Image (cartoon, rainbow, N blue to C red):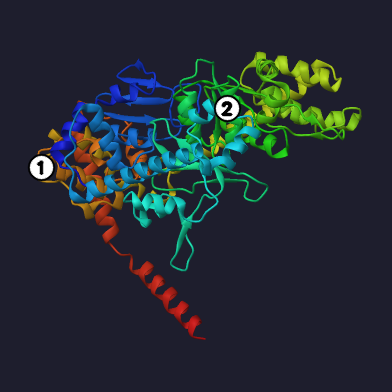
Amino acid sequence: MAFPQSFMDELTARCDIVDVVGSYVQLTRRGSNLFGLCPFHSEKTGSFSVSPDKQIYYCFGCKRGGGVINFIMEEENLPFPDAVRFLAKRAGLEVPEEEGDREAGRRRQRLLELNRDAARFYYRLLQQPEGRAVQDYLDRRQIRKATAVNFGMGASLDAWDVLLNEMTAKGYSKAELLSAGLIVDNKKGGFYDKFRNRLMLPVIDTRGDVVAFGSRVLDKSEPKYMNSSETPVYSKRRVLYGLNLAKKSKRRGIILCEGNLDIVTLHQAGFDNAVASMGTALTPEQIRLLSRFTKELVLCYDNDSAGKIATERALQLLSGSEFSVKVLQLPRRRTAEGELVKQDADDFIKNQGPAAFERLLSGSENGVEFRMAQIAGKYDLESDEQRVAYSGEISALLASLPNEAEREIYAARAAETARITPQAIKIDVEKARKQRLRKEDRAELRKNLNPAAQLQPKDRSLRYENLSSALAEQGVIRLLLLDDGLFSSQPPLKEEDFSSPLLGRIFSLLWRAKEGGQKVTLGALAGALSQDEMNHVASFCQSPESPQNRQKALQDYISNIQKERRSSDKTDPLLAAVEKYKKTNKGEKRNV
């Protein structure tokens, strides 16, 4: 979607990247650049760089980069046109849109309005006699009316087309209802409501938009829980249920649970800092979202095998991050028959009360303690053979801890658990740590022995066929971005002179901007390049160019590109004959 270049120039001029990124990331000046903790991956040491001069960001850890528009696209989960509109609103600019652009923006806005109207309709039904079955269910679950109102809960009726008729009467088309995932095509030309005879839970993002719905059946039929499918305005990887409310909490940190109704019960009990993922394990996108509001997390998943696996995955994902992570393990509940069964947060609050949950929360263990307990549970520590095996596995875990004091403290605890001397465990931990470091050193050595691989783009689909030429092509683009005054009025190269189609396309885009009298910046490419392509351009723009020798560097780069081009144009007769023979022989084999 094209916006007038004059508007884009004014937008990027008004939206200084330091100001925009600084509203999301705490930045500290280090030389000519500013650094902070990357919002796109978990880290403890800031490798996220922002260059005021180049107006670009780049993370040396996860290798993501680009201009101010790319940052908003990534951070706010917005497509290019919506990121432009987001920044324009921030800068107080009116967006001059073409008809096609306006139509796409209108379609997205219509879906958000449709979701909002559907949520209001479900909410009204809950207040009316038709919604009595859902209200009875809420009463059985001990969910108070004030809580239901706070979460915007509603009711879908035990009928096929109540929502369909209501929304079409409001002027929404069946195509819009399908796109929002609110109705289903029966494959015979008819349509029916997706959600029927259910408690409805609108999913509201941190901007206050209703983006999707969760639901719970009222009886024992399946599926028990049903959520919206992915839509143009909803991605379950990027949303957390209840975060719109939890972000306002005065309690420290955020509690991460599995189920929507767990969140409702916890908020009602005073734990209004609880959120849940929408039918998915914790994702990097959700971690980035959480990092905007807290640096303290408590994982409170169900105490069954699936919950323990989810906890372990989350701990691995959060390993090495800036988050302080604890694990709250809910104890199993004994039934009237004497059987021990799992209980979720909703069960625990109802059976034991908020004070008991508060005590559990205060005593929740950190991630290392949780993983140590999981390992200990795998072994019979009365057996000498099993204690040796336990020592080996626990030592491998402790060897991964970067802090020596942590290793010593937890080694002592592990020794006590297995009734082994602390010195024996410490020796095993040190041995495992040395093995780990040797493995990392070998991997680093292999990498260093293959410098060509280091110079290739991270994305394999962007790999260079002629590395020597491509490095020179990168240099030309880098200089054009740094100082387009180095270039004459005529382009020194044509797009076809570039061995890399991507670099040739980037050069042409930048040169057209220069010819049009526009500012030549990396941010101007945001709408023309994919994020992977932009990441790569931002990475090679980190290489320095000496201010004194830029003109000579430009000539050297151009000479190298032209030399490589001439070399590739020369066909080796012997290689050509071999290639012809291969093709002929292959054809003969196919004909046999």
Residue hosting label 1:
516
Residue depth check, mark 2 versus mark 1: number of the one nearer the observer: 2
Label 2 or label 1, whichever comes before in sequence order = 2
Instruction: State the image quarter where residue 542 is shown.
Output: top left
Of 159 and 503, nearer the camera is 159
Residue hosting label 2:
144
Residue type at numbered disc 2: Arg
Q: Position of residue 182 (x, y in %)?
A: 45, 50
Can I make out residue 280 in this image? no
Q: Which structural element holds mark 2? A: loop
Residue at left 52%, top 25%? 146
Q: Position of residue 242 (x, y in %)?
A: 51, 30
Of 35 and 39, nearer the camera is 39
Residue at left 44%, top 74%? 582
**Left/right of residue 30 with respect to residue 293 in the rendered view:** left
81 up-or-down from 357: above or below: below
471 up-or-down from 55: above or below: below
